[in-house]
Amino acid sequence: MNIKNEAREIIQSIDRQGLLNRMTNRIRQSLELSEILAATVHEIRDFLSTDRVMVYRFNADNSGEVIAESINEFRLPTLKGLNFPADDIPAYAREQFVKARQRSIVDVENQRIGLSCLDCPETGEPLAVDIRYRPVDPCHIEYLKAMGVKSSLVVPILNYDIGSQQSNPKLWGLLVSHNAQSRPISEEELQVVQQVADQVSIAIAQSNLLSFARHQAQREATINRIATLLHAQPTIQLQSALEETVAVFQGAGGRIYINKRDQNTGVETPFNSQVYTCGEQLNLALIKNERGDEIDELDMFQTCSLFADKNGGNYSHKSQYKLCAIADIYQHPNYQILAPAFAGNKIRGLIVIPLEYRRQLLGYLTILRHEINTETLWAGHFDPDGRQLYPRRSFEAWKQLKNGQAREWTAEEIELAQALGNHFAMAVQQFQLYQQVLHLNNDLEKQVENRTAELQKSLNSARLLKQVTDEIRSTLDSKTILQTIVREVRNLLDTDRVIIYQFTKQWYGNVVVESVKSNCVSILGFEGPENCFPQEIAELYIQGRVRPVDDIYNADLAPCHQKFLENIQVRANLVVPIRMGTVLWGLLIAHQCDRPRFWQTDELDLLQQLASQAAIAIQQAELYQKTRDAATQELAKAQQLAKALDELQQAQSKLIQTEKMSSLGQLVAGVAHEINNPVNFIYGNLSHASQYIEDLLQLIELYQKCYENPHPTIQEKAEEIDLDFLLDDLPKLLNSMKIGADRIRQLVLSLRNFSRLDQSERKPVDIHEGIESSLLILQHRLKPKTGYPAIQIIKNYSKLPLIECYAGQLNQVFMNLLSNAIDALEQRDHQRTISEIKNQPSQITIQTQLLADMQGDRPWIGIKIADNGTGIPKEIQHRIFDPFFTTKDIGKGTGLGLAISYQILVEKHGGNLKCLSHPGQGTEFLIEIPCKPIIKINSEAKIQEPEYSE
């Protein structure tokens, strides 16, 4: 009985370990959470043999849904896809699931519940795994009976945010097992289910990371797609970009409102503005102010922004204007002034994105969104106002429909809206600049004489901007882009020097890019004067200030700053900040060295735009470099994993072959030892037996001489035993017995030499002994067989020194190579006729020789083992040393022999193993081993000579 119990426990342990291994492999093989959860419930139900196992996931409002299930359809109905209200699981129970990682086991028939806590709820310290039973709440019993459940097991599934510094888990869901009959749950089964739940927690964390990465990739793709429409052509495609944006947010309609600038003053005005629309629109004419007057569209958007500011609204990225996201216009009293515009349509929410560029409001982008109808499939009808004071009697699916629901704007959508707003703002600003150029071109015929120069300069500026923009799009090398900027600015402004000065620490840096005329000194790499850059000036640069200096001697400069400019031959300069948001990255500076210069407004604007382009180029280059670094790191990790896997496979193959050879060596050594004792006994006594019999034969011969007429009885017995034949054959018989015993002694010696169990370290050995031992062991395969002659062995041995090596492993190499040669010859002989075999018999040639010094410090030994078989095809010769590669039939080869031999010769002995094969002519393996001759002292001449073997 004890043996059966032990066997049962072993089988159960194997089942538990198999379940954990399958779940671990499933998580490693797939990142799709639905597949992992489906496998989880199936495996656990199969392990527990229960009627239903399901995964219950909590929603944001603490209600839950069954998202994975495995059931016995004949015992319990399905609950997959059904939702359960938050009141079904009390708040204190959810708290215990998180703080104590509490598991519960309910036995309905005995009306008791077993609770097992993994952690102490007060301290969080791990507790001993046990199950403590107590009476269960009757309401809970009624709840389970209504579901048709007699026993249940609930294990919490926690979610750990592995991408956050905080390690506090959140309750993600429950792993639940139901059974229609009473079923006890052991601590071992509970522990296995808990381990599976822990694996599911890991899978959830991995799935969350995958979802986040996919979301980020989708977000970047969306921004790039819309940015392409906005920046791909000189005339931006605002309408197409608006339609694409509306589609991204699944909106009902959209609207872009752009303030047009006065063509003469450049000041923005609410009059004559430009509007782009897409899809459904609001009736803005119905919006009235407090006095009952119609309000302007700009005032309406600013009203939204104002209320968003009062309510702690969302800021656009580093902006003074507020992004306004309204989920339900009817639920916000501050926005009731806008409610009339929503009458008569299903639009319920909107998001208003200010288009701001360089702290100037260019307009607004508005996305409208419809109300939605929600449909929830509940597990049984319930009264949400009654807070479930009584357990439900039925869990039949109940569909709840809610019409006219508002969709909340998620944080991801608001973040995407802010990013797209920045692109729209930049595109609108570029579009307005382009419209100004068009306006100048339209008036060119009227003002040819007095505005030709200005127009030409504007066109040159536009070309430079386009060139820089194209450069940014064509390359991600910030150095190339910045060099293009300084070169083209110097040519366009016809100035002496243009540089880019980068801050390396607070208010201090050096010149990183320069374009200079030949008659001016180069200041590339120059550092600015320390403590000569007032903080108030830096604050102005951060705010976007442009500083033109027409003459350094008439400007308000610090003495140290003026002295520095004199030293680098500067008389006038124009300084434009390069900003990364609120961070001052550097300065774009134009120098006039030979004279004062009055800087024009268009020159200031040009440098400002180029500074903005430079900031974009630097940001893109930094992002690209980070991406490349991350990709390089991931590639390095992948290569390391591949290398580790390859090394593991080789180690496994080597371990398998080593164990096989070790077992074979032990068996051979044991057999040799057992045979050796009786053979030595027989062989040792044969000489004495021969002497005794020779003495007896001499005595008989003496009797025959002395008694020529023996007694008749003796004569009759001599004739019966054929005394003459016995006297002649007995010495021959003893001699053949001696030869056989000697043959057995040689075979035992060869087996011991081959196993080499007593030579696990490097020792001096005779190579020829190892070869002969291998041949003797393989003698049964070399002998003639029915219908096939013997395989001929041709030996060409040279005089070799003893070699320090691992003898047993080297014998393994000889055995592998000779066995492969015999296999090749036997395979070819099976395809030939007897006459063909006799005309060209199968041969194995073994040749040894002493090679010249290959490395200048020691001689090498060369061993050739060749056969005259069919050879190896050229297309697979490069793979013969790969582990597990074999051309033999299934079951006749493991593909490890040559791989192990290569490792033994190359890694263990520092030698070489080469293969030369010509299809149809045979295969030759060349072994090269470095040897260190064993030195012995001549007792007479005291001369050190190497010991050689024949």
Image: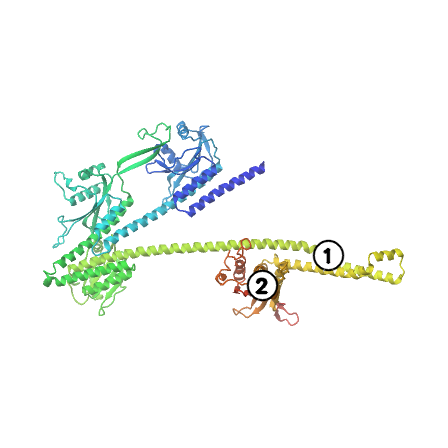
Question: Where does the image place residue 176, in percent across and percent down from the top left?
Answer: 42, 36
The residue drawn where x is 89% and y is 56% is: 712
In the foreground, 562 or 18: 18
Q: Which residue is mark 1?
A: 682
What's the amino acid at mark 2? Answer: Glu
In the image, is residue 545 above or below residue 850? above
Q: CA distance from mark 1 to mark 2?
A: 36 Å
In the current view of this chain or complex, which residue is farthest to the bottom? 941
Give left or right: position of 579 versus 285. Answer: right
Quadrant containing the N terminus is top right
Give left or right: position of 357 versus 809. Answer: left
Quadrant containing the C terminus is bottom right
Q: Which residue is mark 2?
A: 804
Q: Give the mark nearer the N terminus: 1 vs 2.
A: 1
In the image, is residue 57 above or below residue 757? above
In the foreground, 372 or 201: 372
Q: Which mark is residue 560?
A: none
Q: Quadrant of residue 178?
A: top left
Question: Where does the image place residue 703, in percent across and percent down from the top left?
Answer: 87, 61
Query: Quick check: can you spot residue 324?
Result: no
What's the amino acid at mark 1? Answer: Ile
Query: Quick check: can you spot residue 146?
Result: yes
